[in-house]
Image (cartoon, rainbow, N blue to C red):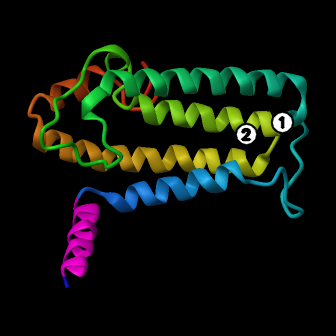
Amino acid sequence: MVMIQKALSLMQTFIERGGWWVGAQFGLLFALVLAPTDLPWLPDLPLLRGQGALIAGFILGGCGAALAGIGLLHLGANLTPFPRPRDDGALVQHGAYAIVRHPIYSGIILGAFGWSLVRGSGVALALSVALLVFFHFKARREERWLVERYPEYSDYQKRVKKLIPFIW
């Protein structure tokens, strides 16, 4: 009985903190990493298979890894896999967070597009677009919780772009 209560408590916490977003994110990333290069019913995209695409892919991937890594470092003890902020957390607005509100998401998106180019995969490219849309909606939900938790977040939203530095 105690094990069932603990399991139910963990499940409730998972749901309340936005755990389904995390599960969907990892599912999408898993599909992206394992995406085939092409599918018979999709048009061939030869521009994805050139040396320029490969170089651009490595550059995007490296920039994405750097941005996500710096975001992780600046977030520090406030890091949580869930979109709902930690109860004992603090709002971070410095470092990468002064350039973009969600640098980890931005870095993952850049890395996904880089991976698509390195693989020369139109399927992965389409999944990268899906990942961008997914992170837009995840960030939107997360920001409603951040505004509730940190009143100053509204001003931060006005100053700093959400996913693409200086643009969006």
**In the rendered view, does 97 fall on the left or right side of 25?**
left
Q: Are marks 2 and 1 in contact (CB under 8 Å)?
A: yes
User: What quarter of the picture does the C terminus occupy?
Assistant: top left
Q: Quadrant of residue 35?
A: bottom right
Badge 1 local density, few (<14 within 10 Å), some, or many (20+)? many
Viewer-proximal residue, 98 or 157? 98
**SS category of the residue bearing label 1:** helix
User: What quarter of the picture does the N terminus occupy?
Assistant: bottom left
Q: Height in image: 42 above or below 2?
A: above
Q: Quadrant of residue 31?
A: bottom right
**In the rendered view, does 103 fall on the left or right side of 46?**
left
**In the rendered view, does 147 fall on the left or right side of 95?**
left
**What is the x, y in percent for residue 4?**
24, 80
**In the rendered view, does 106 fall on the left or right side of 76?**
right
Mark on residue 48?
A: 1
User: How many numbered marks appear?
Assistant: 2
Residue beneath disc 2 = 116
**Residue at x 37%, y 22% (from the top left corner):** 73
Predominant secondary structure, magenta span: helix
**Residue at x 23%, y 75% (from the top left corner):** 8
The segment highlighted magenta reads 2-16
